[in-house]
Image: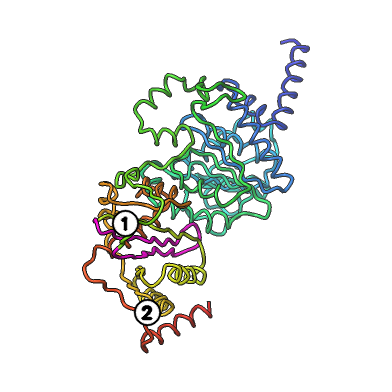
Amino acid sequence: MSMLERSNADLLEALALDRARGSFWAYRQYMRPGMLKGWWQREIARNLQQFFTDFQTGKRPKLVIQSPPQHGKSEQVIDFIAWLVGQSPDLRVIYTSFSERLGIRANLRLQRIFDSEKYRRTFPQTLINTQNVVTISSQTLRNREIIEFSGREGYFRNTTVRGSITGESLDIGVIDDPIKGREEASSETIRDKTWDWLTDDFFSRFSENAGLLAILTRWHIDDPIGRLIEHMPDVKVVSYPAIAEKDEPYRKKGEPLFPELKSLDFLLERKAVMYPPYWEALYQQNPVVAEGELFKPEKVEVIEAVPAGVTKWVRGWDLASTTDGDYTAGAKLGKLPDGRYVIADMVRLQRGPDERDAAITNTAARDGRLVNVSLPQDPGQAGKTQVLYLTRALSGYRVKSSPESGDKVTRAEPFAAQVNVGNVLMVKASWNDKMLDEMRMFPNGKHDDQVDALSRAFGELITKGSGFLFGGDDSQHAALYNHWNGLRLVR
């Protein structure tokens, strides 16, 4: 190579390095010259670049990128982390995913990037220890759980969702697929535990102006990212279906997201063998609740008014334990002389204990004394005290309380049997659609309070003997009323 050719090569290299430092997309192309390139990768790079700009200006960015599996999203976020800490090796980054294996893989990929000659030329100020160091306090650490940057304050720390990060702080929090798969996503317990970890552990590690980046495949309408979007209105969501559902700026309806990697034929093969709701969630980023098989809500006949001759009325209640997403519901159900049943009213609210209890007594006053009131009793003394307080407040009304028995599905089956043979009528009202939707999705839906309330009311209607007692003024009720009221005043 001549001196002129060498000079030109050096100039081109200097220009490439300069562009790579200022542009994440240019950086990716410089570091991975042989990578498959498509409009989607450029679009992701643009959104990530804007995320960094917003972080620099103190906007506390929250970016959610939803994309189908096996489209290179994890590789992109790992490259972005490397570019971020190249800009500022004082940044503290915590990366979390559903498995330890994914976190270690991200860690090792970053180590290889940091060790590469290209990266060292691009970001010479971002250095890591040349040897694996696990416990030597005088040296910057480099192992499968943490990478510290030599002479700087920053680090990369990988952990698992629901893993321990106590005592550590972050400037950039990265979530890469918080849910392992369909089984975990279908478990309300796992979803709740993951959400509690995000809110109580992960978010408590954020510095004042920290940014949140989540890149994932959606699994369920109520998955942790679904809850995040619902609770944080400033979250920016960019969503990429595997197959376009309408004309978009870079592709037409029916075209694949990344044809250079996953062809349309490949995607259609997957779609053909998948349960439609699962395809919608996993590949189209459109999580929908799979319909349940217990109720046939189309069998419910909508009528204009309550028929004459109702022989017995019950208002069944399902009481929310929290105000964070849970509803209290009260269903008014009546029995007709011909053996059919009519849903006359549904009350549904998200309120604290005082407003909830007031709604129960106000509803009873509106219903009148011919409508019996059935209340669930939670286990333990607190549950008994609460119910007795409400019984006292409902003095003069027929009230019955009982613990729930069996699971939700078992309790709902008798009422569902009546619905499915066309024995249930419903008065036309604004609450109809939401109640029917809940029936349709039960028990897979996000909420089941209306079904629970109806199941309770129906159970009382078919029970021989009323079991309902007038709210009384005996000394036990009075004492418990005063005890409960005292607790409420303290609270």
Type of amino acid at the residue the image marks with label 2: Gly
Give the label, 2 or 1, closer to the camera: 2
Number of numbered tags placed on the structure image: 2
Upstream in sequence: badge 2 or badge 1: 1
Please tell me how crowded label 2 is: few (under 14), some (14-19), or many (20+) other residues with Cα within 10 Å.
many
Find out whether the residues at labels 2 and 1 contact each other: C-beta distance under 8 Å. no
What is the span of residues highlighted in magenta in the rendered image?
A: 311-338
Q: Is residue 106 magenta?
A: no
Disc 1 is placed on an element classified as helix
Q: Residue 388 versus residue 159: which sits nearer the camera?
A: 388
In the image, what residue occupies the spot 53% across and 37% down? 66
- Tell me if residue 379 can be seen: yes
Residue 387 lies left or right of residue 233; in this view the side is left
Rendered residue at 32%/61% (across/down): 334
**Nearest the eye: 190 or 408:** 408
Q: Which residue is under mark 1?
A: 408
Residue 307 location, quadrant: bottom left
Element under disc 2 = loop
For residue 102, side relative to residue 95 (left or right): left
Pick out the residue farthest to the front.
Answer: 308
Residue placed farthest to the top in the image?
Answer: 2
Which sits in the foreground, 79 or 43?
Answer: 43
Q: Position of residue 213 (x, y in %)?
A: 59, 43
Determine crowd level at label 1: few under 14, some 14-19, many 20+ residues with C-alpha closer than 10 A.
Answer: some
Residue 253 vs 239, above or below: the answer is above
Please state the horizontal and vertical placement of residue 464, each as a whole percent of the image.
21, 68
Q: Quadrant of the N terminus?
A: top right
The three-letter code of the residue at mark 1 reads Lys
**Residue indicated by mark 2:** 471
In the rendered image, the vertical position of residue 268 relative to residue 278, given as above or below: above
